[in-house]
Amino acid sequence: MKITFWGAVRTVTGSMHEVQVNGRRFLLDCGLYQGRRKDANERNRSFPFSPKSVDAVVLSHAHIDHSGNLPSLVKQGFEGPIYATPPTADLCDAMLRDSAYLQEKDAAYLNKRHHRRKALDPALEDGPVEPLYTIEDAERALKQFRQVPMYTPTRLDDLLSYESYNAGHMLGSTAVLLHYHENGKRIRLAFSGDVGRPKQAIVRDPDPLEKVDYLIMETTYGDRLHKELDAVSAKLAEIVNRTAARGGKIIVPSFAVGRTQQLVLLLHELMNARKITRIPVFVDSPLAVDATKIFQRHSECFDEETRQYLLEGEDPFGFQTLRYIRDASESKTLNDLHGPFMVISASGMCEAGRILHHLKNNIEDPRNTVLITGFQAENTLGRKIVDKMPEVPIFGEPLRLRAEVAKLNELSGHADQRELLLWLKPMVAGLRKVFLVHGEPAQTAAFAKAAQQQYGIETVMPERGQSFELG
Ligand SMILES: [Zn+2]
């Protein structure tokens, strides 16, 4: 059994690990690499193996950095099954189409810009840009999904099978346990996927895994400790009440899948407990609307608290003053509406989408609040806002940032260092090696040190393209 690391090594995107067994090739995840345009383009377009030669993919969860390059794999000849849990498959249906739409739009924009430049300088070369993949490619990939519920042993080859466990990170998210057996020899290789936080809203806590020989483990927050979830709820209430009292609007850039539903549930809780003023709340993103419907269909994944809503005949993702907006023209009517109200919209890092219009219309008014709910990567508009730059560019226009900027970083779906160590604990006895992935180098190194100190286990931080023979 041989494993090779191709993505999410010493970084947090492009998750993709190769497992070779019995002359056959399998992938754990096939995620989109996100970074500088040129690097991302090269990385996502060229696979280090022939996609035709891949026998099957096992997908840990729907997030785009884990699933988002599947359409490229299919476009380049992969014909095998993509195994995923039913909620993951349903979410990918919405997310891969959305991702393809963005790829097409991005290529169209670049081609238009090139066309204009070429008109001024006919010597310019570089032909038109092809989208990384199209909606058609995404639809082909979706046909190759095979839905397998958690805990269901599934054969990949005569010598290899797997089953998946709840990772507690988002709806349908899993850790994958591979079993290799040949002539009485057995190897158990686990892949953590992304590990969730215990007590996180909506999904159940991560399952403990046991009796594992080798482990591939994420370390996104390998060096951090999150705040308690109760503190998050109190902080959200304060922000809402403060802004509402001055008649302001709360503009919330949020990831459409996972983060938005978590926020809605938190607001629902606060409204029921009468801890916040009953202001109108709008979820203004077609992808978020689709994703929320998928969440509603998969109540089998809910934790006790979320299930309780159903038992009481309530929709966890709906309350009296909440409205979901799909239609662009309805979205525009929010421009003329007076505060106080809240609008939750995508994209999460303010790079595209309807959130840009809401920011443009509201960022210069000191009565308003921009509520940042997640990590903002360097060079994004979200980062400029969170860094409170006095002036921020929106649609090429410099605008004065006079609205309040508030942060709610604790909604992360990733376990922190203490929670990762806790998840690792039941596996420690018998564990021969842990491969640490899905983290910036400093985070991964800090986690390696903590795991060695606490459990005395051998950790490895693989390089991209590095292979290991597992015996
Ligand atoms: Zn994830």
Image (cartoon, grey):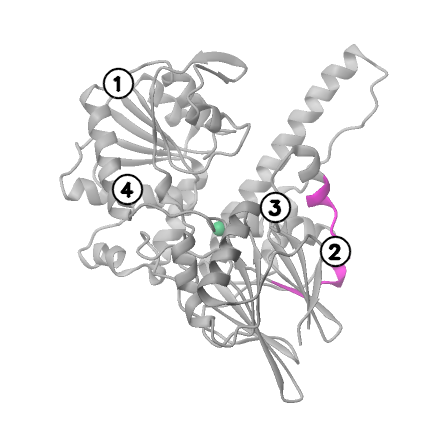
Image vertical order of residue 42 relative to residue 51, above or below = above
Task: Assess disc 3: are there few (<14), some (14-19) or many (≥20) residues with their C-alpha within 10 Å of its C-alpha.
Answer: many
Q: Nearer the viewer, residue 179 or 150?
A: 179
Q: Which residue is mark 2?
A: 77
Marks 1/3: CA–CA distance: 39 Å
Name the element at disc 1: loop
Q: Is residue 445 left or right of residue 201?
A: right
Label 2 to label 3, Cα distance in Å?
17 Å
Q: Mark 1 or 4, which is nearer the eye? A: 4
Instruction: First in sequence, mark 2 or 3: give its number.
Output: 3
Q: CA distance from mark 3 to mark 4?
A: 30 Å
Q: Which mark is residue 32?
A: 3
> As drawn, which residue projects farthest toward the left?
274
- What amino acid is at disc 3? Leu
Badge 2 or badge 1: first in the primary sequence = 2
Question: Viewer-nearest of labels 4 and 2?
Answer: 4
Q: Residues within 10 Å of mark 4 (few under 14, many from 20)?
A: some
Question: Seen in the image, is 298 located left or right of residue 75?
Answer: left
**Residue denoted by label 1:** 338
User: Which of disc 2 and disc 4 is earlier in sequence?
Assistant: 2
Q: Which residue reaches farthest bottom? A: 184
Q: Nearer the viewer, residue 435 or 201?
A: 435
**In the picture, residue 1 is in which quadrant?**
bottom right
